[in-house]
Image (cartoon, rainbow, N blue to C red):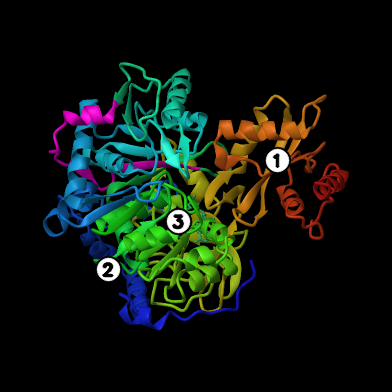
Amino acid sequence: MENSPLIYPVPKAFADASNLTPDGYKSLYERSINDRDGFFAEQAKRIQWMTEPTHVGSWSFKSPVKIEWFRDGILNVTESCLDRHLETRGDKVAIIFEGDEPGESQTFTYRELHRHVCRFANVLKAQGAGKGDRITLYMPMIPEAAIAMLACARIGAVHSVVFGGFSPDALAGRIVDCDSHLVITADEGVRGGRIVPLKKNADAACEIAARNGVTVKTQLVVQRTGGDVAWQDGRDIWYHEAAAEASVDCPAEPMSAEDPLFILYTSGSTGQPKGVLHTCGGYLVWASMTHDYVFDLKEDDVYWCTADVGWVTGHTYIVYGPLANGATTLMFEGVPTYPDASRAWQVCDTHKVSLFYTAPTAIRALMREGDDPVKVTDRTSLRVLGTVGEPINPEAWEWYFNVVGDGRCPIIDTWWQTETGGAMIVPLPGTVDMKPGAGTFPMFGIEPELLDADGKVLEGATEGNLVITASWPGQMRTVYGDHERFEQTYFSTYPGNYFTGDGARRDADGTIWITGRVDDVINVSGHRMGTAEVEAALGSHPDVAESAVVGYPHDIKGQGIYAYVTTTAGTVETDELKRDLVRHVRAEIGPIASPDLIQFSDGLPKTRSGKIMRRILRKIAANDYDALGDTSTLAEPAVVDALIDGRMNR
Ligand code: WT7
């Protein structure tokens, strides 16, 4: 992406009414860095404590890495998200549910949500679940997904939400990794007019998990469609039947600030997905604080984040952040292009959405449909437009700003990660002129630095590897069950720093531009996919001898998945085989891991020590043959020409 020369001043009407001014940001930021503990002690007052903490941050990024915030505080996050609002906001809408089909919507006030969560919590208790147990959720985007998450938190259980688009194999892997004996799912999901067989997938996952030593004792099934599903008596329970007998009174379990709140699996550059662990106190402070500042939150806002609860964006910015702040949060079951490309903006009009948060890939997909589907809607309720998940190209940024927001709404490009719990680098609305594509400035308490490959700190206008030098409350605490992997992944490359895995550029005025992953992680439609995982899936196909997977530029997805495949001797390399390989990867991981392009190749570029040179494969996949760099260290340089021929002929 080229550095855009464009600068968009904050729209005047917005700036006049925004919660923060440019000077307000600067002084608060300075305070947050110069007196970190004082600043976060104050921020901790945003949430409800049973016992207020006296400690603030205690952490070390040097081995043994240990991170704690507010460690002697006692709380239950659901009291902040529900109970404390009852008096002042009991009749305020907490959740607006917008179903897949237009017109199918439902609201829950804070009082109603509180009752639903308590009842769900009692159903979990009746199944023997309690503090510290891991509960896996495999749910569609229905209110019960949020209710189930909060119900887990209510009783001190640790939820692990698995995105409903993952395959039975992927789900089973996550159930086994955290030794989860209770699964919450739905009969079927509905998305874009299509049925997603969640219960069927969960049944298959339970079988696979059992073969791998973990027996799911209970499957709690929420009825969404009423479609036919298989049933295993003794294990499967309809939620609505169990709920009919459950009380709506459920005291909140007292939790230490550092007790786990949830696990969320995410892909890395090596091995299987890791269970990112977040804890109760620091995470909630961070979710609440960042949601408030990023969206310039006001009491009457209607807030809509289009993410799925299966990703961290859904955790922090559909459920925990907005509810902790007593906001109205919209949950959308469908996709922004169903039944047509106006849907997202119609939803905004119907529910008077003022804060809208989505991913660049969705913006590009909608932009492709032209301006008309946008222009037939009103959208005057919109106030702030956010984006997350991947770098946004200036064309998409400008379309979002000019066409969707009619030039009235600031665009807030939020850079963060599953690991960071919430937004880290962002142009806070009203505080800074906007540069399309720039993450801009750090959030309060965040100290980013750019390092060269040797770990030398780079000053001024420069480009390098992005690290964060000091802890913040929303930081992940460990990889579930594997603290060594946590240290190794994030703290060994640049000892003493948290390494993000991203590269970034910095202007002379300090503006930060995220340039993308510098490791073997592909960002497909704002979702992270490890090349090693896709390679492992391909490698389990009988016709595959070896494969190498890289990302390449893709118009809509940002990056697509490009697979170089060497087949076993005697295999006939047909288009049918390519389709079969795609089917195979979808079955192993899920549709989001589907290779977009497959190239059969007799050999892969390797060093003499046998290491695949991905740098070269990335260039060839991008049709960028001039800058292949030094190929002299390759064991067989001729391989490269064959690969280029193959790429050009496809
Ligand atoms: C990776 C994290 C944060 C929730 C969604 C993704 C990329 C994320 C941006 C942005 C440029 C971004 C980074 C990061 N990323 N937001 N605004 N601009 N890149 O969470 O799956 O943990 O992925 O997404 O590469 O490392 P995730």
- Residue visible at 73% across and 26% down in the picture: 543
46 above or below 234?
below
Q: CA–CA distance between discs 2 and 1?
A: 49 Å
Classify mark 3: residues with Cα within 10 Å, few (<14), some (14-19) or many (20+): many
Report which quarter residue 203 is drawn in. top left
Mark whose residue sits in front, 2 or 1: 2
Q: Residues within 10 Å of mark 1 (few under 14, many from 20)?
A: many
**Nearest the eye: 27 or 456:** 27
Q: Which residues are magenta?
A: 238-266
Residue that mark 3 sits on: 343
Q: What residue did someone put label 2 on?
A: 298
Tag 1 residue:
548
The kind of secondary structure element at disc 2 is loop
Compare marks 3 and 1 and give the one earlier in the sequence. Answer: 3
Q: Which mark is residue 362?
A: none
What is the C-alpha distance between the residues marked 3 and 2? Answer: 25 Å
> As shown in the figure, which amino acid type bears the numbered disc 3?
Arg
Residue at image location 22% in from the left, 27% down from the top: 242
Query: Considering only order in the chain, which callout, 2 or 3, is on the residue closer to the N terminus?
Result: 2
Left or right of 453? Residue 126 is left
Q: For numbered disc 3, what is the local secondary structure?
A: helix
Q: Nearer the viewer, residue 84 or 616?
A: 84
**Whole-percent x and y of residue 182?**
33, 28
Magenta segment includes 262: yes
Residue sitting at the far top: 233
| Above or below: residue 34 compared with residue 201 | below
